[in-house]
Amino acid sequence: MTNPIVRFAPSPTGNLHVGNVRTALINWLFAKAHNGKFILRIDDTDTERSTPAYEAAIREDLTWLGLSWQATFSQSDRFAMYDAAAADLKQRGLLYPCYETADELDRQRKLQRARGKPPIYNRAALELSANEIADLEAAGRTPHWRFKLSGNRVSWTDLVRGEQTIETASLSDPVLIRADGSYLYTLPSCVDDIDAGITHVVRGEDHVTNSAAQIELFAALNARPPQMAHTPLLVDVDGSGLSKRIGSLGVATLRERGIEAMAICSLLAKLGTSDNIDLRDTLAKLADEFDFAKIGRAPARFDGADLRALNRSIIHNLPFEAAQPRLAAIAPEAANPDFWQLVKQNCDIVEDAAKFIPVAFGDIAPVIEDEDRDFIRTAAETLPAGEIDETTWKVWTGVLKTQTGRKGRNLFMPLRKALTGLDHGPDVGALLVLIGRERVLKRLL
Ligand code: GLU
């Protein structure tokens, strides 16, 4: 394969959610796998709804995920190109003015449905005489502009969906320019894809119908269409489509919740593919394993529990240096390598360490059951003299075993609950060193 050139083309009208990120990631991995180029295109032709803040957030999220781009541009800088393409299409009669209002179109569609006909635009505008157009314009109507589809069959071999055929006669001529003069993404996207030499358009399957129109648009603009790949959508575990919940599951939110970038990328790269969902350390590794042929046709089910499990695997092996800034943000004393080494096995996210900070460095409410009171008193009396070190726990529990006859859970659980206030957590013997003699005795007495 020649080196592919792909693009991710978000509209800066909201934050990136996991569905967008999956599209970005698949484009990125495909480019990486074949020494290609990944372009970030900002689809901001809708100047009303696009904001610089959303654009900045998109760039920040992609950067955090490691999805770096080799080139980037914004559609709002390129209106002259789109105007030129539109003028050319108009001149050739392929882009024609329509004057129907939204209400009129709505009524038309209802009527068609009532007659059992598909609600396809009836091309009445093509029949308007020059006089009728002049009257409409004199009455203050401004046109929106539709692209005239050929009515032929459009076919392509989709890298995910296989052979695709769409009868363009079954589609309405798509509106390319709104009545206010603004562009929908359809035409700018083709103009940009041609200009940037895009070899593969990779996006969600909600764009399949657009692809038929765009393939005709590429031809109308004298270009060969790129190859296409349409991935099944991401759905919530309950299968209900990209629900509001997942839809609003933004990358920034996940990051704030302590989820690591590689947990997100590992999950989104493998979801809905024939590979198992397993953690990968690097995007390069995910790219090595990437293949469109592995992507199935069924919707990919996004499960937060999978994400958490992947995150846990990262955290369990996360070096102190990586956790340090976030530990310090919770509490300065938590940025301690011994503490991190000890607690990370009990954390799904770095921030879970917070639970053990008072245990190691502060005050807790010891839990001592009535039946354990004598035992805990004996424990306080037999704590080996001197500063606590790595050997203390073994010596201490050895003595306690002999003196009280307790062993196993009966011996260890009351100590854990008294010393940590919890019935689970890191190794108590190792924690003891961090807790220190003074606080150990305070918790036991
Ligand atoms: N801005 C479009 C979208 O987000 C781009 C679609 C495409 O990738 O061509 O839906």
Image (cartoon, grey):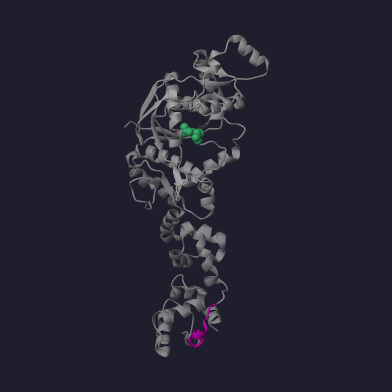
Is residue 305 covered in magenta?
no
Q: Is residue 405 visible?
A: yes
Residue occupying image coordinates x 53% and y 64%: 354
Residue occupying image coordinates x 45% and y 65%: 346
Image coordinates of residue 114 in percent, x first then y, are 52, 28
Image coordinates of residue 104 in percent, x first then y, are 60, 24
Residue occupying image coordinates x 49% and y 47%: 64
Image quadrant in which the C terminus is located: bottom right
Q: Is residue 41 visible?
A: no
Q: How many marks overall?
A: 0
Work out which residue is located at the far front of the displayed protein and give it: 115
Image quadrant in which the N terminus is located: top left
The image quarter containing residue 165 is top left
Image coordinates of residue 62 in percent, x first then y, are 49, 43
- Write down the region rendered in magenta: 366-378
Work out which residue is located at the far bottom of the displayed protein and give it: 403
Is residue 376 covered in magenta?
yes
Image coordinates of residue 103 in percent, x first then y, are 61, 27
- Of residues 35 and 313, the one drawn nearer to the viewer in this rendering: 313
Q: Main secondary structure of the magenta part?
A: helix
- Of residues 427 and 123, the one drawn nearer to the viewer in this rendering: 123
Work out which residue is located at the far right of the displayed protein and give it: 139
- Of residues 153 and 3, the one drawn nearer to the viewer in this rendering: 153
Give the vertical position of 50 relative to 143 (above or below).
Answer: below
Give the vertical position of 165 relative to 237 (above or below).
Answer: above
Give the vertical position of 321 relative to 284 (above or below).
Answer: below
Q: Is residue 271 left or right of residue 192?
A: left
